[in-house]
Amino acid sequence: MSAPKPANPQWLAGYFDCRGCIFLHTRKPKKMALRVTLSGNSILLMRVERLFPQNNGGIRTGRRRQGAYLEYNGKEAKALLKTILPFAVIKREQVELALDYIETIPETGKPVDDIDRARRAELADDLRKAKAG
């Protein structure tokens, strides 16, 4: 029996439930940033990257992390999250909150309005609660 291919959205959702992370930088309310990370075997990550290319340099290795990882920032995470949403189990609520957050990101160069800023703060609290379990 062969291993499932990452092109399969069910496989990808399971991989994300196990090896994925959704992180929201909230230190500066005016500069909140969403980051979605997948870590693990670089060969598997290369297959994921072919399906969901990203703009920030490809597969990386870091001093604080063991192994390789892929990182998607802001709107570039949208396609990945939409693909895994129907099949995510453990991190489903986090995926839904991240997609809601992405909808508050303005077009390049446009400022964030007060309504979206308040919504972002609310989503950050909800995401923190979802991660806490």
Image (spheres, rainbow, N blue to C red):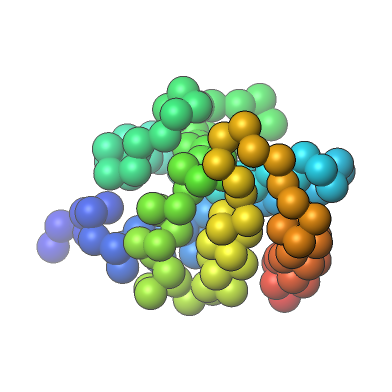
Q: Report the residue at 72% width, 46% height from top.
A: 112
Most foreground residue, 62 or 128: 128
**Residue 66: x and y, percent?**
58, 35
Quarter occupied by residue 87: bottom left
In which quadrant of the rendered image does the C terminus lie?
bottom right
**Can the viewer see residue 132?**
no
- The relative height of residue 51 versus residue 64 in the rendered view (above or below) is below
Left-right relation of 48 to 17 = left
The one of 96 and 130 positioned closer to us in this rendering: 96
Q: Residue at x 23, y 54 (%)?
A: 7
Front one among 29 and 48 = 29
Name the residue rendered at 59%, 74% in the picture: 93
In percent of width and height, residue 126 lies at 74, 70
- Taking the spot 71% from the left edge, 40% from the top edge, the residue there is 111
Q: Position of residue 110 (x, y in %)?
A: 64, 38
Against 95, residue 39 (above or below) is: above
